[in-house]
Amino acid sequence: METVPTDYTQDEDTRLMLAVKAGDALAFEELMNRYQGKVLSMLIHFTESRQQAEELTQDIFMNIYKARGRYEPTAKFKTWLYKIVENRGLNFLRSRKRRPERLLNTSPPNDGGGAGGEENLLAQSGYLPARQYDRAEEREMVNLALRSLDPRYREAVLYHHIEGMDYSQIGQIMDLTPSAVKSLLHRARRRLAEILAPYMKEGKRPR
């Protein structure tokens, strides 16, 4: 049975990108308004540096605009964009020598990442705090724990809990089946629970 190609032009953001391809600068400005903050937020978690994340974000959108004439809607715009973000983030991690002491720096801000994501992660990690912590402290502890995860675990967690993507959407970006994404997230949550356990039980910062 022949598979009918998916028509991604029904996606509003994809139509905007096609308008960019046709030379509409205002359409590109609209896409940047919609996604620049989210891309920056994702890259902060990858790079652990707002400055590095800002540079990568600017570079990604600049390259997209320069290559607009070659754009083809092979997926929804959001999926296509986040695949680019994933590649740039992972390439950044591979190209630098990680310094463990940087994990103790001040946690990055939750820019454009969706309110409540970190608190939801605390609940889904399987632990509840033994005492009441303010939300700013909770976000800091979760961000420290996230930054100590394997990059693939971290990426899946960010897409699902911070960006609100479902298994299928994440799978398209990470080249995984929905069931593989579910398994990956399960392992990531278990690892987060291990990392956060000292904080939940005794108030100690994750290492």
Image (cartoon, helix red, strand yellow):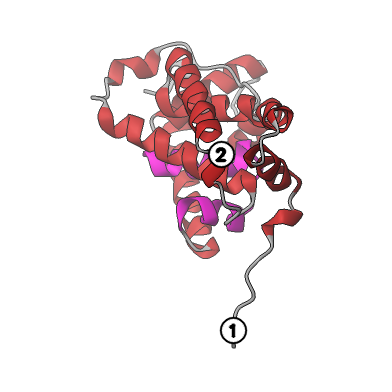
Residue type indicated by callout 1: Glu
Residue 126 position (above or below residue 181):
above
Residue type indicated by callout 2: Arg
Q: Examine the rendering and report whether any part of residue 19 can be seen.
A: yes
Q: Residue furthest bottom?
A: 1
Was residue 155 drawn as part of the magenta stretch in this picture? Answer: yes
Q: Where does residue 176 sit, x and y in percent of width and height?
A: 46, 59
Give the Cα distance between marks 1 and 2. 31 Å
Q: Residue furthest left?
A: 97
Q: Residues within 10 Å of mark 1 (few under 14, many from 20)?
A: few
Q: Where does residue 117 sit, x and y in percent of width and height?
A: 65, 33
Residue 2 numbered tag:
1
Q: Main secondary structure of the magenta part?
A: helix
Was residue 202 drawn as part of the magenta stretch in this picture? Answer: no
Q: Examine the rendering and report whether any part of residue 201 can be seen.
A: no
**In the depicted view, which residue is nearer to us: 157 or 47?**
47
Q: What is the magenta range?
A: 150-175
Quadrant location of the N terminus in the rendered image: bottom right
Residue 203 position (above or below residue 156):
above
- Element assignment for label 1: loop
Q: Is residue 94 left or right of residue 166?
A: left
The quarter of the displayed image where residue 81 is located: top right
The mark that comes first in sequence, 1 or 2, is: 1
Residue designated by label 2: 68
**In the depicted view, which residue is nearer to us: 141 or 6?**
6
Residue at point 47%, 21% (across, down):
53
Residue 67 position (above or below residue 30):
below
